[in-house]
């Protein structure tokens, strides 16, 4: 946001949070809101889109492309994306449902598609090592 251009670190952070919510118990990601609940809005993000006067539509297209590239099309059924115009600006709310049948792997497109596995723990998104991932998958989805 501060650079007034796409920020791959922020994009990755958003995608890993969505993956973690899908892999755990769901949750809500607010884009345009700081962790301390300060409303930033999406205006600076909108300024990076030059094609259309419908900046929300352009933002959503960009978000759709990120989700497809990082998480794949199988992630979309778990997402409900809405925009809200509130005091302080427009924000994006992504409600994420958990996948109760299977895990999702993030493909880190900034690093050549390196596969990463994330979960939510407390209020944090955590990356798991391959061994931890296998143990988590076994205990989370393959309960007897």
Image: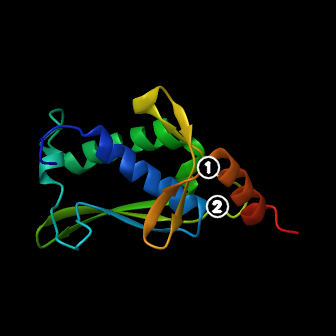
Q: Position of residue 72 (x, y in %)?
A: 55, 40
Residue 131: x and y, percent?
A: 70, 49
Decide which of tag 2 and tag 1 comes sooner along the chain: 2
Q: How is the structure coloured here? A: rainbow
Q: Where is residue 101 in the image (x, y as percent from the top left)?
A: 73, 59
- SS state under label 2: loop
Q: Is mark 2 in CB contact (under 8 Å) with mark 1? A: yes
Identify which residue is drawn at 58% across, 70% down: 25
Q: Is residue 138 above or below residue 87?
A: above
Secondary structure of the residue carrying tag 1 is loop
Left or right? Give the position of 5 relative to 64. left
Q: Name the residue under label 1.
A: 104
Residue 4 location, quadrant: top left
Identify the mark at residue 99; answer none if there is no mark: 2
Taking the image as shown, residue 83 lies to the left or right of residue 64, namely: left
Residue 30 badge: none
Along the line of sight, which residue is nearer the eye, 108 or 63?
Answer: 108
Residue ranking furthest to the right: 144
| Residue 15 in the figure: left or right of residue 59 | right
What residue is drawn where x is 12% and y is 73%? 87
Q: Give the CA distance from mark 2 to mark 1.
A: 8 Å
Judge left or right: residue 104 versus residue 48.
right
The residue drawn where x is 38% and y is 44% is: 12
Count the numbered circles shown: 2
Q: Label 1 neighbourhood size at 10 Å, few (<14), some (14-19), many (20+)?
A: many
Q: Is residue 57 above or below residue 5?
A: below
**Label 2: few (<14), some or many (≥20) within 10 Å?**
some
Quarter of the image where the C terminus is located: bottom right
């Amino acid at each position: 946001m501060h650079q007034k251009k796409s920020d791959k670190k922020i994009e990755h952070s958003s995608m890993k949070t969505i993956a973690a919510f899908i892999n755990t118990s769901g949750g809500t990601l607010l884009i345009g809101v700081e962790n301390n609940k300060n409303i930033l809005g999406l205006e600076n993000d909108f300024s990076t889109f030059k094609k259309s006067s419908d900046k929300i539509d352009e933002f959503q297209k960009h978000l759709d492309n990120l989700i497809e590239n990082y998480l794949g099309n199988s992630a979309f059924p778990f997402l409900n994306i809405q925009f809200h115009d509130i005091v302080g600006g427009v924000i994006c709310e992504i409600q994420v449902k958990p996948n109760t049948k299977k895990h999702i792997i993030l493909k880190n497109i900034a690093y050549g598609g390196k596969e990463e596995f994330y979960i939510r723990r407390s209020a944090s998104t955590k990356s798991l090592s391959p061994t931890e991932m296998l143990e988590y998958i076994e205990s989370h989805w393959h309960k007897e």
